[in-house]
Image (cartoon, rainbow, N blue to C red):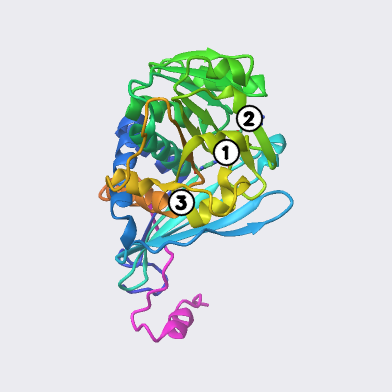
Amino acid sequence: MTHTTEPSDKALVPFVSVDHMMKLVHRIGLAPMLRGLAENIEADFRRWELFDKTPRVASHSAEGVIELMPTSDGEVYGFKYVNGHPKNMKEGLQTVTAFGLLADVGNGYPVLLSEMTLLTALRTAATSAMVAKHLAPMGARTMAMIGNGAQSEFQSLAMKAICGIDSVRLWDIDPQATAKCAANLAGHGLRVTACASAEEAIEGAQILTTCTADKQCATILSDNMVGPGVHINAIGGDCPGKTELAPGILSRAGVFVEYPDQTRIEGEIQQMPKDFPVTEIWEVITGRTPGRKRAEQITLFDSVGFAIEDFSALRFVRDRVAGTDLYHPLDLLADPDDPRDLFGMVQRAAPVA
Ligand code: NAD
């Protein structure tokens, strides 16, 4: 409480660094962590209606986008800062980086600050697999993984941990990305096949994941490539003017989204009329609406990433780092002894001559 020159424990906010997050993954184990995140996300989707929801606040530039993603369940508030800069990769930088915060709604004080670059990859993969569990065809064992960048191993291993896929077929326009992904996936219990085209990658696959980064309306999958009965997990179309699927696929599929107000701006459905019918995935999870209606139906998860997934992931981290050495206590709050004497606190911190 006392904040003269040394912060006390009470005023310190746990900060989970990238190093801590990596240690957390190893301590829990990647598969159990992905399953734990998916459980938290699914639990929060079940109480969807009580959350504050808004499309994320996006600041667009010619190079990319910087976004803030806030939400609250009435007791805890959370937000994520995240960027998306497809051109970064060519400059040796990441396309996506992020950090996030949880705060106590009761007094507004932050209770956790965390890196979220790794956590975003983990929560995106956990969300994809949790949704695929509800929508993918029965007995799906093979996934095509198109786009073999930073998200790809997480996507593949979450589908294994949560949906039981045992085979992944890789394709990327950059053979080095595919070689990296294949090498990283070795020893994780997946049969990995590097393919020479998107067409080859989707051969025999029941789940088609598109996870490419390009600031344009691309056609990663064309209409004639997609046969009946598959589940498409479309990850990379997540910004105005940045999509991956031919509109004809959307017309033939049952389209499932996180939060329509955001997805209509950012997702694959930005290509469709404003009243294009979609199903909110929380309604499937709670049993209000059927998911897959027929074996031959194409189901499509038009993922853009929603704030509640980050909130659920931060809750997971908060609970799992409590009582461990996996955070730094951060001097983020002023918290003077007398809350009105902020100035006096500064004055008392003057260096002694
Ligand atoms: P990354 O830049 O690390 O990897 C993207 C890969 O796509 C690269 O290897 C690139 O060579 C490949 N690629 C580009 N065009 C291609 C094409 N036409 N065919 C095949 N491969 C192609 O990016 P990342 O961090 O893996 O993210 C991938 C995408 O996922 C980005 O667009 C990002 O914005 C998006 N994303 C979405 C969510 C979500 O919640 N939906 C979360 C995180 C990232």
- Front residue (pair 318, 49): 49
Tell me the tag on residue 220: 2
> Alpha-carbon distance for marks 3 and 2?
23 Å
Where residue 54 appears, as percent x and y from the top left, is 47, 62
Quarter of the figure with residue 26:
top left
SS of the residue at dot 2? strand
Task: Kindly tell me whether mark 3's CB lies below 8 Å from ligand 1.
Answer: yes
Residues in magenta? 328-353
The residue positioned 38% from the left and 67% from the top of the image is 7
Instruction: Give the quarter of the figure containing the N terminus.
Output: bottom left
Badge 1 crowding class, 10 Å Cα cut-off, few under 14, some 14 to 19, many 20 or more, is many
Where residue 297 appears, as percent x and y from the top left, is 43, 30
* CB under 8 Å between discs 1 and 2: yes
- Front residue (pair 62, 315): 62
Identity of the amino acid at label 2? Answer: Ile
Is 292 colored magenta in this rendering? no
Residue 247 in the image: above or below residue 206:
below
Q: Is residue 113 left or right of residue 197?
A: left
Q: Which mark is in front, 1 or 2?
A: 2
Residue 343 in the image: above or below residue 134:
below
| Image quarter where ligand 1 lies | top right
The residue positioned 51% from the left and 46% from the top of the image is 304
The residue positioned 59% from the left and 58% from the top of the image is 58
> Alpha-carbon distance for marks 1 and 2?
10 Å
Q: Is residue 352 left or right of residue 132?
A: right
